[in-house]
Amino acid sequence: MNTKDLQNNISRRRFLGTAAAGTGAIMLGASALSGWAKNLTKLGTTDLLKREYETDVLVIGGGMAGLFAAVKAHDSGANVVLVSKGRLGSSGQTPFAKGIFAYDATQEEMSIDEFTAQVSASAIGSNNPVYTRQVAAHSLARVKELREWGFFESPLYNKSFTNPIKKRNIPLIERVTITHLIKENGQIVGAAGFSADEQKVHCFKAKSVILCTGAGGFKPNGFPICDLTHDGTIMAYEIGALVTGKEWNDGHGGSAINPAACYDGWHGMFDRKCGTTGIGIRHDLGVDMNYQAYVSGGGKVSMGPGAGNTTVKGGPQKPEGFDRQRRPDGPPEDGDNKNRPDGPPPGGKNRKDGGPDGDGGAPPGMGGNMVGGSSAGMSIHKSEGLVPINDKCESTIPGLYAAGDALGSYMAGAIYTQIGSSLAGSAVQGAIAGEAAAAYSKQIESPIFSEARQQQVREEILAPLKREAGYSPAWVTQTLQGIMIPNFVLYIKKENMLRAALAYVEELRDTHIPHLRAADMHELRLAHETRNMIISAEMKLKASIMRTESRCSHYRLDYPKIDHENWQAWINIYKGDDGNMQFEKQAFGTWPDGSAINA
């Protein structure tokens, strides 16, 4: 078949390639051709306008962390610009979160010291106690501010988020995808990206940057992370930042009925108002369900009362004292939330602080028959992202900060330990990062983001639009999903399968990323997101191979036990001088420079 015939038959070929990727039967010989096509670009790259901004603090991300980062940086005397890939308060995982932890010393029977110690016990030592303590110490103050802004009055967050931004006249730029962080002379000087709605490239000069870009996945169906693709983490990695946490796995599943329909399975979360939660330390949402499905040979399992490690022998184990599962359909048979070892459900009726009540019970989608993989590619909240060098959310790149799911703070370690702590942690860390970035920016001269560097970045951003032919980002994403999402690759790990998947991912990295094409601004966003997901997949596979033990949400079938002798450490990842991905251990209880973490 000649090139013209191949192009004419591309629709059928793409369908065949998609089917192959969906079943995992990926053949990078024949099916690679099915993803290749002429790039029918719908716009001229020379017509794209450039928009420039200059500020003290640039906040990237419009979720809970980004809101508080912008507000607190402004209130600390800095000029702030807030830019978001989506709409303020309406993209990422923030709209889905409907429980926020609030520690009130006058209400709780457990001290912050006891809380921190119990989280560490559940996390099997994998948490950073400074950030564990922070979320308890500052959560109530953040909740009070949210209440003043009207956060608890509606299940939709855009209006309440807009209130403090408008009051302070903070410039807000929405629907702009940031693709590049800019570093000069060893420090951050800005960022660049493009608009989804206009033919514009945006260049930001900034004395400091705060990444509030969330986590990400491989665009799985059934859970609200389809627009999160580790953008911030990969941008920071490219300029030399340490990142961490790639071997851990979020274990959220989806309903076995219409499993790809996110709203069908989780509308109860989207539709209800947010409520507050108190202390209820757990060891939750690891890979128990995935292990059950693996050994039983079925694609779905029941998560009703009594489910957990009692269904099958072996598999992931909870630390002592955390072996009781919460009943997904409500409180235990004694009907008393106060006596539950794992605390009340989100918005439970027994809250003593007068916070808004939710509908009780488990989140929709977490009971009955479930299928796994709905959040494939995402780690435990707060366990992946940029490595902090101190308690101020500062990264290894001067002037670059991160907060929320973009910061590998290990606030709760490598497992979920506290309902509502993720949303609270984003608020707390956003505020801390905002104040720290504002203080840093006062010591820095105006950034230099040269015209030559801007032009270079512009060329890199627009490269997929200029390619005459290449792979569509949709096809490459489907191929990546077929490689990474299977239960026996991502969740129930063993070295031979991890290395097999890695060979495919490295092929995508080397031969597909350079040829991603885009016909319009929407597809341009997809091309950059696909690239980020491929690099993240490489990180996940290599970190999973490196950690030769099982702990919390990382389970190795060939290394099923915890190795306290060799693995009391986090895995950090960085880009070497030769451009290759490098890995190192950072001992639990220490900062990257080896100094002790004093909580």
Image (tube, grey):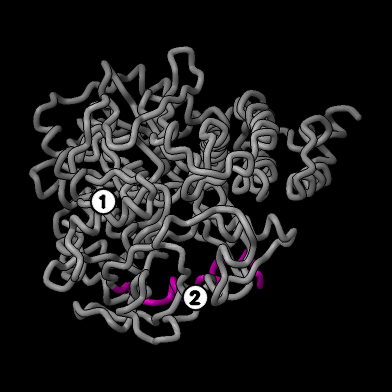
Q: 261 or 577: nearer the eye? A: 577
Q: Is residue 300 above or below residue 402?
A: below
Q: Nearer the viewer, residue 62 or 333?
A: 333
- Side (left or right) of 189 relative to 489: left
| Residue 465 forms part of the magenta stretch | no
Query: Does the rendering let one see residue 598?
Result: yes
Image-based side of 328 in relation to 572, left or right: right
Sooner in the amino-acid sequence: mark 1 or mark 2:
1
Residue 253 image point, x, y percent? 56, 62
Badge 1 amino acid = Thr
For the C terminus, the quadrant is: top left
Query: Residue 153 location in percent, x, y?
Result: 27, 77
Is 541 above or below relative to 434?
A: above
Q: Which residue is mark 2?
A: 328
Can residue 180 be seen in the rendering of this structure?
A: no
Question: Gap between marks 1 and 2, in whole Å?
Answer: 26 Å
Quadrant hosting residue 436: top left
Say the numbered circle drawn on residue 132.
Answer: 1
Neighbourhood count class around disc 2 (C-alpha, 10 Å): few under 14, some 14–19, many 20 upward: many
Q: How many marks?
A: 2
- Does residue 258 show up magenta in the picture? yes
Stretch in magenta: 256-275
Q: Give the residue at x 25% y 46%.
A: 129
Residue 52 image-quadrant placement: top left
Image quadrant in which you'd find residue 55: top left
